[in-house]
Amino acid sequence: MKSQLFAFAALATVLAAPAHAAAPAPSNAAPQIDVPLMKRVVETLASDALEGRAPSTATEPKVLDAIIAEFKAAGLQPGKDGWLQDVPTVEITGSHYSPLTVAAKGAPLSFTYGNDFVAASYRVTPHTALKDAELVFVGYGINAPELGWNDYAGLDMKGKIAVVLVNDPDYQTESEQGPFKGRRMTWYGRWPYKYEEAARQGAAGVLIVHDTFPAAYGWNVVESSWSGAQYYVQSANDGMDQTEANGWIQKGVAEKIFTAAGKDFAALSAAAQQKGFKAVPLGVKASLSFDNAARKSISHNVVGVLPGTTRPDEYVLYSAHWDHLGRCKPDASGDDICNGAVDNATGVAALAALAKANGTAGRTPRSQVFLAVTLEESGLLGSEFYAQHPVYPLAKTVGGVNMDALRVSGRARDYQMIGGDKSDLTTSFRATLQSLGLKEAPEDHAERGGYYRSDHFSFAKRGVPMYNLKRGLDQFDGGVAAGEAANEDYVKNRYHGPNDEYSPDWDWSGITQDVALFYRLGRDLATSSAWPNWHPDDEFRRVRDASRGATSK
């Protein structure tokens, strides 16, 4: 047995739970974590034979078969509608962009696609055209009733283009104090929120003003990300409830537009940081047009379940994305397969190991759902589709654990809660760390909004609290220097490149530590009768309260 399974007792000084007397209920202390299973999953999913696991390609069925086989071996049952959930997506590629022109007093302004602005449409339509649409500066474009903040108060945005600042109003604060958590970016600061809110307000278009520091990346990232194909979940109305065009403009472009409108960009930006800011019509009109080519396709999520014993209609969710980039830019050797071993074959391996560990330990009162999602690399589309069309109701989903790109390195003394202290899950997280002799470390670069960039977020924004954890840098073997070196090596030499490949020489001790922690946290949710909620001032509290309230009616 020792040659086949990782001896969990070897981690006793760090990961052993306190001893419990025998009892009918299963223990939440992790059983042995099957490292050979995880090795097998990563080696299979990251093999050249699967060509980088691009969704909707000839290799997708092989990927799905491999995951389903592991789920079956772990004792999972297929989801309510079967092992697979269809995920219909649409790929929209813009072309033939006109300049962005602004009619103001004096000579009209004209800005070039790529250098000055980028834009795309969420609508499945062959042509997008905004003509003489009024520009309105709406500050940070936030409507947050729980904070008494509404940048759209009193506005009718029909036929108008919202000009919006990136990030949220207190991003310049050094600490995390403030209505929008200071330096830590909230959902209100992320660009997808700003597009979604503008659509809810009936705007014809949105232009986000790019600024490198609050955006946390340069214009080159915006330009490359918004050039070429964009992917979205198909909708019944082909996205016609969205704005006609969503885009970005350089800060210098915004300054020129405001000057032409007789406004002070810096002064209005400062005013937008204060509660009670009123939107400012700029008195100038913009025009923009481009063509769209749309291609629809189907990919798949994999859904397995361990039904609960006494409360089977309450659910705990474990998620990891199976997709990667497929074939990509060749390296110096000519290798053009982005294998995605770390990103995210490790997450799927952890998912399979958790399924087996929970099956071995025995079923819990609540049902446990294991979800391998597609199209994360295209914008969290697989998890987004599940959240829009849940196999198991989100109002009855207690919470969950998401796993993405587990670092190949040694065990650590600390863990980070990505997103910070947002919900009741933090209390469980801290208590579990303490019981394991581990520490909590602050999140690296909280200002970058990392919480909003992986699959757990699709569920969080619909009210389901989700763990998204990161092993800290303070390794038992080598300390912080070793942790930083491992991170830097992956980011510089392997991330989203052909070198993200499986090696039999990997150190699995850190990943095994991760999975043991995930097991404890998920198992606690599955055996408890508690319903964790977001903190009262959190951006997701309203939707959780509404969904939970609906279940009691």
Image (spheres, rainbow, N blue to C red):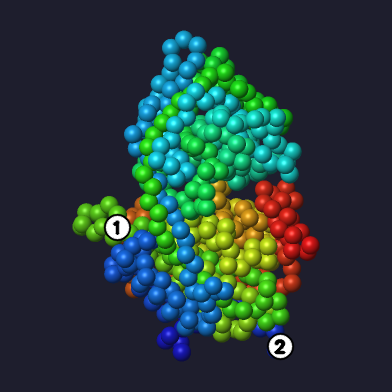
Q: Find residue 211 and report its horizontal and vertical position in percent.
A: 49, 32
232 relative to 517 in the view: left or right: left
Q: Crowdedness of circle 1 by 10 Å Cα count: few (<14), some, many (20+)? A: some
Amino acid identity at mark 1: Arg
Of residues 128 and 383, the one drawn nearer to the viewer in this rendering? 128
Residue at x 53%, y 66% (from the top left corner) = 319
Residue 207: numbered disc = none
Residue at x 43%, y 18% (from the top left corner) = 109
Residue at x 48%, y 78% (from the top left corner) = 71
Q: Which residue is mark 1?
A: 327
On screen, residue 96 above or below 85: above
Q: Residue furthest right?
A: 553
Q: Secondary structure at mark 1?
A: strand
Frontmost of labels 2 and 1 is 1
On screen, residue 428 above or below 102: below
Work out whether residue 348 can be spotted: yes
Work out whether residue 252 can be spotted: no
Q: Quadrant of residue 181?
A: top right
332 relative to 226 in the view: left or right: left
On screen, residue 54 above or below 126: below
359 relative to 329 in the view: left or right: right
Q: Find residue 551 and report its horizontal and vertical position in percent.
A: 74, 63
Q: Find residue 333 and report its horizontal and vertical position in percent.
A: 20, 57
Q: Secondary structure at mark 2?
A: loop
Of residues 532 and 234, the one drawn nearer to the viewer in this rendering? 234
Q: Quadrant of the C terminus?
A: bottom right
Q: Find residue 436 and report its horizontal and vertical position in percent.
A: 62, 71
Q: Which residue is mark 2?
A: 24
Q: Crowdedness of circle 2 by 10 Å Cα count: few (<14), some, many (20+)? A: few
Q: Which tag, 2 or 1, sits closer to the chain's start?
A: 2
Amino acid identity at mark 2: Pro
